[in-house]
Image (cartoon, helix red, strand yellow):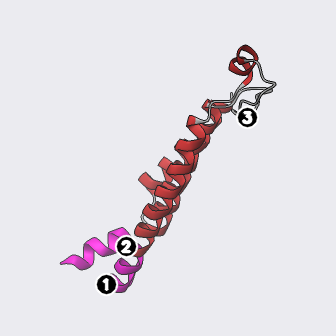
């Protein structure tokens, strides 16, 4: 069920990207889609009653392998957050430049002003 909610969140972002004419709203839709993918990756690594993937002297290998949470999705999400932050900064900078050039955030107005 929770995976379906990730899909719904992704579809909300996709709807914003496809239907909106304002560049800022398109950027917000892309951000929502990115967060939906990050949430999905974190949920893939979730294990109920899981333990941190740290082995100490008192931990048996069999018990550890059954209870440990997979750290790979968490590392992927941390990397995706950093990369996503850079991409969002670039998109916002492009939106600002487009506003400086055309005086509007509306895509249809930009096409009309192009000449």
Quadrant containing the N terminus in the rendered view: top right
Tell me the mark number nearer the camera, choosing from 2 and 3.
3
Where is 85 relative to 95, above or below? Answer: above
Q: Which comes before the other along the chain, label 2 or label 1? A: 2
Q: In front here: 20 or 71?
A: 71
Reply yes or no: does residue 102 show up in magenta: yes
Question: Nearer the viewer's eye, disc 2 or disc 1?
Answer: 2
Picture coordinates of residue 14, whole percent (x, y):
48, 48
* Badge 3 element: loop
Classify mark 2: helix, strand or loop: helix
Residue at x-position 41% and y-position 79%: 96
Residue at image point 56% right, 45% down: 77
Q: Residue at x 36, y 85 (%)?
A: 100
Whether pointer 2 and pointer 1 mark residues with C-beta atoms closer than 8 Å, the reply is no
Residue 26 magenta-drawn? Answer: no
Q: Earlier in the sequence, mark 1 or mark 3?
A: 3
The residue that disc 3 covers is 52
Question: Residue 59 occupies which quadrant of the picture?
Answer: top right
Task: Look at the image and tell me in which quarter the C terminus lies.
Answer: bottom left
Mark number, residue 101 = 1
Marks 2 and 3, Cα distance to the nearest angstrom? 41 Å
* Front position in the image: 112 or 42: 42
Q: Where's residue 7, x and y in %?
A: 57, 36
Callout 3 crowding tier (Cα within 10 Å): few <14, some 14–19, many ≥20:
few
Q: Which residue is mark 2?
A: 94
What whole-number distance in Å separates the C-alpha atoms at marks 2 and 1? Answer: 11 Å
User: Which range is magenta?
Assistant: 94-115
Q: Earlier in the sequence, mark 2 or mark 3?
A: 3
């Amino acid at each position: 069920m929770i995976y379906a909610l990730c899909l719904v969140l992704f579809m909300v972002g996709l709807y914003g990207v496809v239907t909106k004419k304002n560049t800022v709203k398109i950027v917000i839709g892309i951000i929502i889609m990115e967060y939906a993918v990050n949430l999905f990756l974190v949920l893939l690594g979730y294990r109920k009653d899981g333990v941190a993937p740290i082995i100490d002297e008192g931990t048996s290998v069999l018990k550890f392998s059954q209870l440990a949470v997979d750290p790979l999705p968490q590392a992927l999400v941390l990397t995706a957050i950093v990369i996503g932050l850079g991409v969002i900064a670039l998109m916002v900078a492009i939106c600002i430049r487009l506003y400086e050039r055309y005086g509007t955030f509306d895509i249809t107005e930009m096409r009309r002003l192009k000449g």
